[in-house]
Amino acid sequence: MATNDAALDRSRMSFRETLLHGTGKAFHPSSLTTMQKLVLRFVILGLVFYGFAAIEGMIMRIYAIEPVPLIDTKHYFGMLTVHPLVGIFGSTYLIVMGAFLFVVPLLMNKPLWNLRLAHWNLWLIVVGTFTFWLDGFITHYAPLYTLYWPLPADFTQYHPLGGAIFITGIALVMLGTACFITNIFATIVYRPAAATEPVASGGVAIRSALGITGVANLFRSRERRAEHAVSLPVAAIARGTVDMAFNTIIILFTGVLILVFMVADLIGRSLANTSVDALLYKNWFWWGLDLIADGLVLIFVAGTWYLIATMITGKPLFMQNIARAALLVELVVSWTVWSHHLLSDQAQPVMLKIVSGELVTAFELVTQGLAFFITLATLWSARPLKMTNELKFLLGGLLGFGLAVPAGIIQADIGLNRILHNTQWIVGPHVHVAILVGLTMTLYSAIYLLLPTLTNGATLYSQKLANFHFWAHLVGGVGMGAFMGMAGLQGMLRRTIYTGDEFLPYMILAGVCGALLIAAFAAFLFNIVMTVGLRGAIGIFRPSKLDSTLLLPAAPAPAPAARTAH
Amino acid sequence: MGRFAGGTQHKERRDPGPVELSDRGGDGVGDVDSNMVLWGQTVLYTIYALVTIAVVAWFAYRVTHPRPPGPVKTGLFWTFFALLVVGGVSLHLTTAATIPWVEQEINRSDTTPDKTFAIVARDHRFELPAMPLAIDCDDTVLFKVTSEDLTYGFGLFRRDHSMVFQMQVVPGHPNDLLWTFKNNGLYSIRSTEYSGPAGARMGVADAVSVTGCGKAV
């Protein structure tokens, strides 16, 4: 991104002009293809929902220091319920989906299978997220995202209508997710009628994407081994999408089950909630929910690291066959680790705790550790590198997972879980460091990397703001996780209101770090708005007049990663 | 037998004599208690985190420096792989060998407790068989907690708010935890699982009293 020129242009343009037209008037939304606009809409709306989650998070950080009189207990837990859901589905899902709907066609050199489906994908998730967020705000339906049975159907605490609207919002998100899953797999397998270059058959492509080709190659002689028909990032996206599909089925099924109880109550025929076994429910729910945290997030992130590293360096990925194999192992591991969430459930079979909860979970240290090493080794092979925004945020993302994954492995231990479960340790050094530092900084890296391509060369308004964004986010994210973790080790529980000053010093420090995160986001948002201008931002939401099959205005050329990742 | 009120006592105990209650008493079997484990974890994880931050910072510095590019040796990769495997597995082996309640947890069906407390959770309240639950030093106690409505948690906390232990309390299933108390203390019970806004402050202060140990930590 041409930030030197941007500084020059800024001196020539007034603040008002830049705010309206963007830096150097370099961004022209009319030059964007439908696909570019669609991806930018995913990203913008994802960032809006990130703002929702960040502000809610900050309010709760303040509440942990001094309970706010305006917010009663019900409202607080309503906020605590929607905070992670808005963050995961409204923000992360949208940004990731937007990026992958662009990257898969780009790397496979063919248009997206169905553009209309991608629009449904976007708006179903936006409307669904806003629905459950607003419902949580108004009705205070607050079973938290863990939904331990029979809490979601406890109508002594929640009105069934509020719950039904909330679940409907979640269901809309899942339907939007189903659109994404369909589009990704269909794009991988379909053969465009107007293809000018040879395209792998659907069967060959899907076998390569899911890792079946790689497994079969293990049993073939070197001469008979099949080539990989899809690039490594596409394989990562496909494998993560498998987990996304399973997760969608489980959440939809669970939602329907809860809705049945709500509708029955609304029509005056209350069902006995003992008809659902609470432990069995917990097992299937965690099996499905864990496919996000321990499945698609880790797989998508590894794939994104590989893509960014190869695009930054222009070099092939280090040990790429091992990287492919590790992604497949991670997929299988993600199906078998859910029991680490039930190490404190005494009725859970001990063998499941040891094998699934401890040993298989420990494999995540191996698979994510390999992704960490492979990414660093790829970058190292191309030194000296310029410390660009995408590189520094990529390193921040790597650091985040480097800190958060071992923190998770520590709590997935029978002995340590007895004194860590549901403490602030879980949500601090593990969850928030993984999401805010590991995942979010990886996404910022992708945004900084793809912004020039998606905007046809818009110039970043301020590198100083980008630097502030980086440092404030990194220090804020790591610091907040650390202070939450210290409080957790002193016995502070999550999902609990403390009215005394038991953990006040830690909460004040975590609050300061939370404020840094908010400041970082504000700086980023301002920088982006000044880059594209308000008119440009509005123009992104206007229809494109270019050929809708085009990915980019010029004929799409194979991306660097596509050439090097095979 | 007569001194114990509430719950079931399984064997006679000697009279421990008067001792002081401790605010931060140890607990757990053997000499290792939860405070010691958490202290060890704090030190080790802090060292790990600082080393990881330093490595990434060093990498960020070096990767921008103009030195002749060279491939990373695959031997380094496989060494790192071996370290990951050893690290992942050895954590569990180490804790199984050093944290005393792990073995007790796994073999709890074979252990005869000195006392058993049957506790009921319902309507966001704990119903205790006595107040406080009196425990003698070295007692191995079985806490049998049942829920009659929602999923709760059952945690024991010292007066400085640090955690002794916790477990989940799932309705329709047995939730029993075996624990050996080695030091004097007065402990509070708190639900460690969210059960809706009504359960935000669910707990009983000073619900468990351990006496009879020869020393106060």
Image: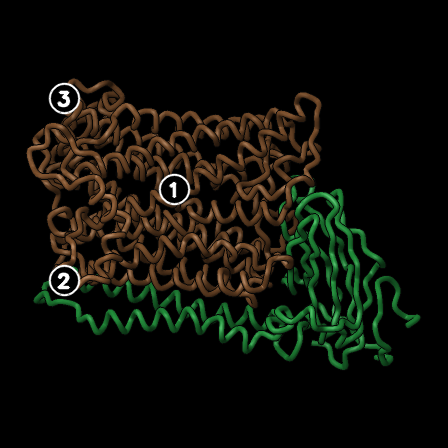
Q: What residue type is disc 2 on?
A: Ser
User: Which residue type carries mark 1?
Assistant: Met
Q: Earlier in the sequence, mark 1 or mark 2?
A: 1
How far apart, in angstroms, are the residues tagged by discs 3 and 2?
Answer: 40 Å
| Rendered image quadrant of residue B215 | bottom right
Q: Are marks 3 and 2 on the same chain?
A: yes
Residue marked by disc 3 = A547
Q: Residue at point 50% right, 52% down?
A: A427
- Residue A169 is situated, as x and y percent measured from the top left of the image, at 48, 28
A409 or B52: nearer the eye? A409
Q: What residue is pinned by disc 1? A: A244
Q: Colour of chain A?
A: brown
- Chain under callout 2: A
Q: Position of residue A2 (x, y in %)?
A: 12, 40
Q: Tag 3, which secondary structure?
A: loop
Depth-wise, is mark 1 or mark 2 nearer the camera?
1
For residue A381, which numbered disc appears in the image?
A: 2
Q: Residue at x 67, y 53 (%)?
A: B169
* Residue at the right extreme, as displayed: B2
Q: Residue at x 88, y 64 (%)?
A: B5
Q: Chain of mark 3?
A: A
Chain of the residue under label 1: A
Q: Quadrant of the C terminus of chain B?
A: bottom right
Residue B165: percent from left, percent from top = 64, 63
